[in-house]
């Protein structure tokens, strides 16, 4: 028996909405999971500016360690943890004005991510 022409595969679910049954993908559910992290598309710019600030402050002895720790904490854990790390090393490794400049850099190169 002939049923007539068949619809192409791309047309079959044209008007129907697809249901996503995963619990975490509901509208607005990931707002609580957002963190302020380093914007990875501007990572090179951030590192260049950070190197300029550290060179101007003459903190050459621990510059590599400080740079690596700030980058890791800002890109994976969050800007707030990177600022806490800055507060820990403020008196010993770097001076207070340098820490303030780095904190402004962190805030400038940050973005909200899930």
Image (spheres, helix red, strand yellow):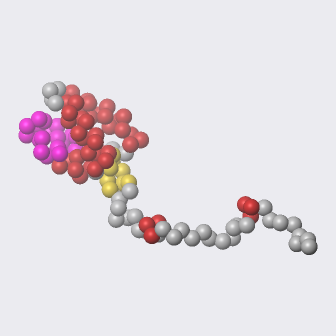
Q: Residue at x 20, y 48 (%)?
A: 83
Quadrant assignment for the N terminus:
bottom right
Would you say residue 54 is visible in this rendering?
no
Q: In the rendered view, would you say 45 is above or below 4?
A: above
Q: Residue at x 32, y 37 (%)?
A: 46
Residue 61 placement (x, y as % from top left): 14, 27
In this view, the residue farthest toward the left is 91
Majority secondary structure of magenta residues: helix
Q: In the rendered view, would you say 78 is above or below 40?
A: below
Q: Is residue 92 magenta?
A: yes
Span of residues in magenta = 85-105
Query: In the displayed structure, does residue 19 sit left or right of residue 3?
Result: left
Residue 111 placement (x, y as % from top left): 36, 50
Residue 95 placement (x, y as % from top left): 11, 37
Q: Residue at x 91, y 71 (%)?
A: 2
In this view, the residue farthest toward the front is 1
* Number of numbered tags placed on the structure image: 0
Q: Residue 103, located in which quarter of the rendered image?
A: top left
Closer-to-camera residue (39/18)? 18
Q: Is residue 99 magenta?
A: yes
Q: Residue 41, located in which quarter of the rendered image?
A: top left
Quadrant assignment for the C terminus:
bottom left
Query: In the displayed structure, does residue 83 sit left or right of residue 27?
Result: left
Would you say residue 11 is visible in this rendering?
yes
Closer-to-camera residue (11/108)? 11
Residue 57 placement (x, y as % from top left): 16, 30
Q: Residue at x 48, y 68 (%)?
A: 22
Query: In the displayed structure, does residue 93 sit left or right of residue 108?
Result: left
């Amino acid at each position: 028996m002939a049923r007539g022409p068949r619809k192409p595969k791309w047309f079959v679910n044209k008007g129907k909405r697809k249901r996503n049954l995963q619990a975490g993908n509901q509208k607005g559910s990931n707002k609580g999971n957002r963190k302020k992290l380093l914007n990875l598309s501007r990572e090179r710019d951030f590192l260049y500016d950070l190197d300029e600030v550290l060179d101007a402050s003459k903190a050459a002895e621990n510059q590599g360690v400080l740079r690596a720790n700030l980058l890791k904490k800002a890109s994976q854990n969050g800007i707030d943890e990177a600022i806490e790390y800055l507060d820990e090393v403020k008196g010993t490794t770097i001076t207070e004005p340098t820490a303030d400049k780095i904190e402004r850099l962190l805030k400038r190169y940050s973005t909200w991510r899930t």
